[in-house]
Amino acid sequence: MPSTSVLENLATTDLEITPWDRLDADWQKRIEKAITSPNPAAYFVTPHTPDALSRILTEAYNQAWPILTCGNGSKLSWGGLMPDSVPLVLSTHKLNRILDHAVGDLTVTAEAGVKLADLQAHLAQHHQYIPLHPAYPETTLGGLVATGDTWRERYGGLRDMVLGISFVRSDGKLAKAGGRVVKNVAGYDMMKLFSGSYGTLGVISQVTFRTYPIPEDSATLVITGNTDEIAKLNQTLMSSSLTPNFADLLSSGITQKLHIGENLALILQFRSIAPSVATQIQQVESLAASLKLKIQQYRQNDEIELCDRLRSLMRVPVSPQAITCKIGVTPTAAVDFLQSLKSSHWGIIHASSGVGRLHLQPEIKTHQVRQIRETCQNHQGFLTILEAPANFKKQIDPWGYPGNAIAFMQKIKQQFDPKSILSPGRFIDGI
């Protein structure tokens, strides 16, 4: 454990170091969700510059101090639990500058602590945006990349949006990849490697994203009716030339909560120039009519309200004891999977990728979650527990990874973090 005198010598105007007993109560609660020890941490460290971030990591590396890294801490409860207290919790939320916005080139570079919502507000002034919708609106760019937290849409997923990153290695050295730099680090595709790494490979200091023009027109369709016919429509749409911004299947638990139906539903959003949106809606209406399905169309404020309600529903657990999971199945199995859920559980699956989110009620047992995980795996998918009470995660592996890449992941971890000081235990197999 670091001595007070050592940390006092490190503290400067660009590096805040706060003892645990003087830390804000909200931060304490977030950190306590990630560390099961009665005394989670000794100090909370907040660098304001990349240089300050480098200095504290250099000292931690030299002293072999384990560090829990985060942005705003909104997803510290995701992933594996850290069983032991840590000397330092490091947050990058004060690295919060927008560094460069090349409007004509459709790129933007910002520090890791910038909130995505704030960056979107800046881009909107230039009629641009990044088509990403994370679980938490207050998420920082670094936290967004580190957890891979986004919903796949027409433009792809998070990895398709990131052009470059800068990060500080576990030994305090600054590294860059992608963007305008000449070559990658160690031959790896660092943007993909760091996406979903949960802060175990390095601490992201800045990110470069591609941006897109805000579409001229937008409309969202909710399609309800016979489940078999919805499945047919979904398969037809996925093989058609239509280009929805997103196409998601909703379980009955969600449709009932949103008051848009009693059974499974398909929700589509089209965003483009007005003639394209109108033409695509007309095609969907024709297909739905042939299958005797009902369509509700939402535009402007009604559309914004519906999408906000849906995202809020999938973001906020029904209670602190509820279980939130990220899931995946083959797209052709998505309808049957959602139909198998009790209406008290909520599920949403992206129609073309089969990746989705699942909220399970607090009364569910670990063996039932294992059964759902087995169902996902039988359909070439997965179930990862994101949020759950600590006691629940102690009884069941949050990751449940059945693949054969553990040895390779451990090798990568050894290369990037040889002393295993960065968020130890949060990733698969305790990495």
Image: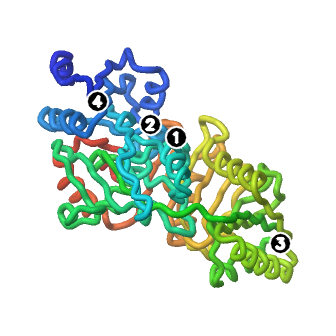
Determine whether 281 is above or below 209 in the image: below
Marks 4 and 3: CB-CB under 8 Å? Answer: no
Horizontally, is 1 left or right of 329 in the view?
Answer: left
Q: Give the structural element (helix, strand or loop) at label 4.
A: strand
Q: Which residue is mark 1?
A: 138
Task: Give the Cα separation between the discs numbered 4 and 1.
Answer: 23 Å
Labels 4 and 3: the sequence-earlier one: 4
Q: Give the structural element (helix, strand or loop) at label 3.
A: loop
Most foreground residue, 46 or 346: 46
- The image's mark for residue 88 is 4
Horizontally, is 58 left or right of 157 in the view?
Answer: left
Q: Amino acid at mark 2?
A: Asn
Camera-near label (2 vs 3) is 2
Task: Give the Cα separation between the discs numbered 2 and 3.
Answer: 43 Å
Q: Which residue is mark 2?
A: 72
Q: Which residue is mark 3?
A: 226
Q: Residue at x 20, y 67 (%)?
A: 187
Q: Give the structural element (helix, strand or loop) at label 2.
A: loop
